[in-house]
Amino acid sequence: MLIIMKRIFIPLFFFTLSAPCYSGGLYDTGVKSVEALPITWSLGADTIYDDNVLAGSSTSKDSALAISPNVGLSYTSKSERTALGIDGNLGLIHYLDAPDLQDKDTYSQSRINSNLYHSFDERLTFKSQNYIANELEPDYAYGIASSRTGKESLSWMSLNALVYRWSEKYSTDTGFKYNANRVDLTGINNSDRTTIEGYNQIRYDLSEQSVLTADYRFLSTTATGVASDSTDQLFLVGVDRRFSANSIGVFKTGLQYREVDQGDNVLVPYLEIAYQSQVNESFKLGAFVRHSAEVNDTVLTDNTGTFEYDDRRALRFGATSSYSISSDLSFLSGVDLIFSDYLEGRNVNTTTVGPDKYETSFNAYVGVSYSLTEFLKASMYYNFAQTNTDISDAREYVRNRISLGLTADF
């Protein structure tokens, strides 16, 4: 595996880590190497106009102005055997004229990521991928949030694995993953989840461009409130394909077997695709697709009661791009589309069958960034979001945001 990583994956990794249009998470293609760069700090602030501050949590449509200061950090290092990358952003959103229904004026909007890769020898490599985030606005690329709640969520993930090459064509990737999500809610909280995952991937090299894969994943999830604990097993086959020196795709499909305590077992088709490409010197592109039964947001409450859904399926699609007109002027854009179906519902008190529900969330942005000086950059973004659902009136909304920002790098 190490030989294949050096031959195929390393030329792409710096592009993966450094491209601002990639959020990691479901965009991840497993391409990991690094080009050493010094520590870079940034200090910035945005002014935001939001025409629906309570979107996702209230039927009241109130607009407000907000300011969002932030401090950023980026650092990468490389030696003969070890590669390390760290990037993060510590920020907050403060509403100057917050609506009365909003529970507070200031929210966190922070995230830190790290990636470590160490080769013990030509056969054995250790990898560690980690992040922690405390956010009001969800990053849909991490596959946790399905719609905006208007509440802060604290989430973190740590994946640690060993990649071992057994022969010229055969290798394995075996690891352990821990991730959790905590939502800032009062009263009975049915939203917190903690998942422990173990996995093993068998890899067979078909050629310098293609690697066949077979995955087994076991996930154990602990939930809070009336939400049930659950286990998931995934049986997947796929291929990692290098289309060119700067373009790679990861394709997986198979079955997900889900067991829910106090509920029913379900068998769900699973699909996972990630693609990244440095099309040319100016244009970067990334995309992902995932269809699965998800462990988050499985409990819904309406005027007839509280229902838990054993089979909450989601189809997620995301795309993001950046295009540099010149060394000073860049355009960025992105879109997320999430189709959620809530099936196999049951009343948590009476165990009677609950109605099926649906939710469709669309989020898109376009932006421009311009370097005023060598160290100072100005930006402008427009974001549009819409959620259609039959879950509740509060969860259905249309929202527009415009932001103007300045960032200094040093």
Image (cartoon, grey):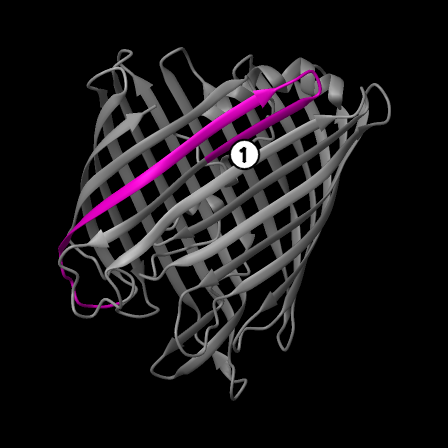
- Look at mark 1 in the image and give the residue it sits on: 28
| 145 left or right, relative to 103 | right
Q: Residue at x 24, y 23 (%)?
A: 376
Given residues 117 and 37, the one toward you in this image is 37
Q: Position of residue 260 (x, y in %)?
A: 63, 69
Q: Secondary structure at mark 1?
A: loop
Q: Quadrant of the C terminus?
A: top left
Question: Where does the magenta region start and end?
Answer: 58-87
Given residues 252 and 127, the one toward you in this image is 127
Q: Position of residue 323 (x, y in %)?
A: 32, 19
In this view, 177 is above or below 191: above
Instruction: Count up the numbered dots.
Output: 1
The answer, for residue 20, to whether it is visible in the render is no
Magenta stretch containing residue 86, yes or no? yes
Given residues 47 and 8, the one toward you in this image is 47
Crowding at label 1, few (<14), some or many (≥20) Cα neighbours within 10 Å? many
Q: Quadrant of the N terminus?
A: top right
Magenta stretch containing residue 194, yes or no? no
Q: Residue at x 70, y 25 (%)?
A: 211
Residue lying furthest right: 167
Which image quadrant for residue 74?
Answer: top left
In this view, 164 is above or below 130: above
Circle 1: residue type = Asp
Q: Residue at x 86, y 27 (%)?
A: 166
| 99 left or right, relative to 329 | left
| 362 left or right, relative to 262 | left
Residue lying furthest bottom: 350
In this view, 232 is above or below 246: below
Q: Position of residue 199 (x, y in %)?
A: 73, 46
Given residues 193 and 204, the one toward you in this image is 193
The secondary structure that most of the magenta stretch takes on is: strand
Q: Position of residue 54 (x, y in %)?
A: 23, 62
